[in-house]
Amino acid sequence: MDQDDAYYMKLALQEAEKAQELGEVPVGAVVVVDQRVIARAHNLTERLNDVTAHAEMQAITAAAHFLNGKYLVGCTLYVTLEPCIMCAGALQWSQLSRVVYGASDSKRGFHQAGIQLHPKTLLSGGVLKDQAKALLDQFFAKKRA
């Protein structure tokens, strides 16, 4: 694991903790370009009553606004959970250069659906996966109790 990857994933985990404090599924994301964080986001589906308000979608929108353009070539997205099918589609359209995720999602992740990201997008998984998974497990255990 790259030191930079761990650093930026820790920032994404901080966003996930913010989501958890709001009663949202604890998923966080940051977008980085040239070692500069240009977007921070977390799940807001409950707060906004919007099923599309996933951390990745919020981060893509914020980064596009920051760059004043719809394509995120040269950017890296760090997200604490493997993106879902919907988010994978948005990631493909945004043409991110790299996607780095923490925990895998065997139920709703894009891998299980056989979906590919943009052909030029590099993908790395498992970065700080134990911390990301622990946040999710804690959240859902509390919900079930």
Image (cartoon, rainbow, N blue to C red):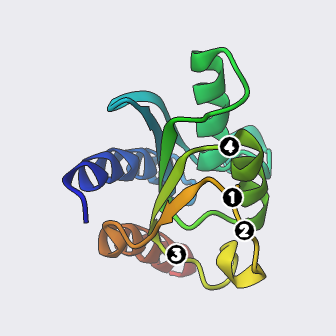
Identify which residue is drawn at 54% across, 53% down: 23
Q: Using the image, tell me which numbered label, if any, was put on residue 10.
A: none
**Residue 6 vertical position relative to residue 126 in the rendered view, above or below:** above
76 or 54, which is in the foreground? 76
- Whichever of labels 4 and 1 marks the residue nearer the N terminus, that label is 4
Q: Position of residue 69 (x, y in %)?
A: 70, 20
C-alpha separation, residue under disc 3 versus residue under disc 1: 34 Å
**Which residue matches tag 3?**
140
Q: Position of residue 39 (x, y in %)?
A: 49, 30
What is the three-letter code of the residue carrying label 3?
Phe
What is the three-letter code of the residue carrying label 4?
Gln
C-alpha separation, residue under disc 3 versus residue under disc 4: 32 Å
- Position of 143 compared to 86: left or right? left
C-alpha separation, residue under disc 4 versus residue under disc 1: 9 Å
What is the three-letter code of the residue carrying label 1?
Pro
Location of residue 103 (image quadrant): bottom left
Identify which residue is drawn at 60% across, 35% down: 73
Q: How many residues crowd around disc 3 within 10 Å: few (fewer than 14), some, or many (20 or more)?
A: few
Q: How many residues crowd around disc 1 within 10 Å: few (fewer than 14), some, or many (20 or more)?
A: few
**Which residue matches tag 2?**
116
Q: Position of residue 86 (x, y in %)?
A: 78, 59
The residue positioned farthest toward the top in the image shown: 68
Query: Quadrant location of the N terminus?
Result: bottom left
Q: Using the image, tell me which numbered label, if any, was put on residue 119.
A: 1
Q: Using the image, tell me which numbered label, if any, was put on residue 95.
A: 4
Tell me whether circle 3 and circle 4 mark residues in contact (CB < 8 Å): no
What is the three-letter code of the residue carrying label 2?
Gln
